Image: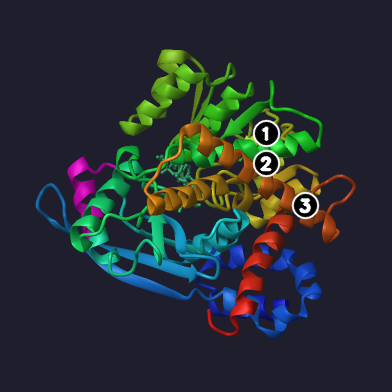
Amino acid sequence: MSISQAIEKVETRYAHQPEFVQAVKEVALTIAPLYDAHPEYEKNKIFERLVEPDRIIAFRINWENDKGEVQVNRGWRVQFSNALGPYKGGVRFHPTVNQSVLKFLGFEQIFKNALTGLPIGGGKGGSDFDPKGKSDSEIRRFCYAFMRELHHYVSKDMDVPAGDIGVGGREVSYMFAMYKNLTHEYSGVLTGKGVGFGGSLMRTEATGYGAVYFLENMLKVQNESIEGKRVLVTGAGNVSLHAAEKVNMLGGIAITVSDSKGTLYDENGFDQEKIDWLKKQKDQSKPLADYVDKFGGEWFAGKKPWHIKGDIAIPSATQNEVDEDDAKMMVDNGIKYVVEGANMPLTAEAIDHIREHRVHYAPGKAANAGGVAVSALEMSQNSVRQYKSFEQIDTRLKNIMKDIHDSAASASDKYNQTDNGYIDYMAGSNIVGFKRVADALCAYGILN
Ligand code: NDP
Ligand code: 2IT
């Protein structure tokens, strides 16, 4: 079956899973030159195999709210591919979580994890539980209940979850406690743990910092630097605030963050004092808009930031947050680089638009791989029961992001996707990630 036939099959079979179909098409449409050069991939039906997860585990979570009422949520773990290592990927708690969202995330995670060059397969999990407005006790009871079910299906060498939207250090710690309690095992079954009990230094910062390290590599190729560049960031969570922090550390000017309620704009940029305040505000689930009273700036209720002029965009909130109209505004407002901190934040039409206008574009698979890469370093530290310093991990992270950048750029060249200095990071990343997985699958025969 050719790739185009495989796409048609996915479109028909999973018409009710639009995010998953979108993620599959993006990979499929860019790996054709690789596929043509490797007839063994088609012979082994690699693409057709990779669009079906190894398995999806679905379960029910019963828990009790503070009023003593029984609550029922749904949970899943999508174990997509363990061709290169244990299934690895985050857990998302958000009311929009469903199988389509988790399959798109799990599918992308296979290639992202392959790009890191570390021994990790791809998976994703989550629940339609909404953490907003829940007390700490409710979060704790939910996390315990979630892991009471999930622990049957994960282990340090088989499937290693971590955080994602709605799941940070607090939630990982509750889940880790329940896993330990049920299995009597103290192991690296989850990453993103607290630093005092098995977590890696820098895991919290890694995704946002890594995205900015990737950006630095892109800028260098174009003989530019981040110094003085105006950067629009979306989201105000783990990825966004650490991306803004690293931009500021490197002399750039991060001028926006946002959340589901609107956009905060500070033309003077977020320095460390402001970022620390933002982190604290979000930790306490307080409104971003309060910033204006303390530091000035502007709050745009219900709006995204794309009407604001800038040089670089780092969308870091959620999938499909940037549509074609937003992309048009980005281009009109001077954005020259788009670096995806989130997973699939641009719609297919938005990607087409910015690429047509030669905006340098780093897809999430490459640009936000720093988080999972440091997760893999956490796994290896847990295995040898020794810990590395912040500086050691930071150096590894910088090298990993440079390797991802360079390998994507050279694949773009090798497969003739680079056009007059415009590097096709999307094709390059997909080609590198896909090739590593496909070669392993071919070597295994027809298992996996
Ligand atoms: P967080 O839960 O820490 O933060 C998410 C942020 O995005 C919040 O500010 C949230 O606002 C905002 N947001 C969520 N949905 C929407 C929406 N529909 N419109 C506007 N804003 C929204 O999550 P993370 O920072 O961990 O994750 C952000 C993105 O990065 C996701 O795509 C995730 O998959 C990806 N990612 C995360 C990694 C990690 O290590 N954490 C690694 C690689 C990728 P509000 O609070 O109002 O909902
Ligand atoms: O999307 C992602 O790469 C993550 N949420 C991090 C996954 C991980 O296992 O650290």
Q: Is residue 61 visible?
A: yes
- Residue 395 falls in image quadrant: top right
In front of the other: 62 or 328 = 62
Q: Residue type at mark 1?
A: Ile
**How many other residues sit within 10 Å of disc 2, few (<14), some (14-19) or many (≥20)?**
many
Looking at the image, is mark 3 or mark 2 earlier in the sequence? Answer: 2
What separation in Å lies between label 2 and label 1 (alpha carbons)?
6 Å
Looking at the image, is mark 2 or mark 1 earlier in the sequence? Answer: 1
List x then y, in percent, for residue 305.
58, 33
Mark nearest the camera among 3 and 2 is 3
In front of the other: 63 or 15 = 63
List x then y, in percent, for residue 279.
40, 28
List x then y, in percent, for residue 166.
37, 47
Q: Main secondary structure of the magenta part?
A: helix
- The circle drawn on residue 338 is 2
Q: Which stretch is magenta?
A: 131-145
What separation in Å lies between label 1 and label 3 (alpha carbons)?
17 Å
User: In this picture, is 357 found above or below 126?
Assistant: above
> Mark 2 CB in 8 Å range of ligand 1?
no
Q: Is residue 336 visible?
A: no
2 and 1 marks in contact (CB < 8 Å): yes
Q: Residue type at mark 3?
A: Asp
- The circle drawn on residue 312 is 1
Left or right: residue 206 versus residue 404 is left
User: Tell me, what colour scheme is on the image?
Assistant: rainbow
Which residue lies at the image location 63% right of the left edge and 29% below the top edge?
231
Which residue lies at the image location 55% right of the left edge and 66% below the top edge?
84
List x then y, in percent, for residue 243.
54, 34
Mark 3, residue position: 424
**How many other residues sit within 10 Å of disc 3, few (<14), some (14-19) or many (≥20)?**
many
Left or right: residue 361 versus residue 110 is right
**How many other residues sit within 10 Å of disc 1, few (<14), some (14-19) or many (≥20)?**
many
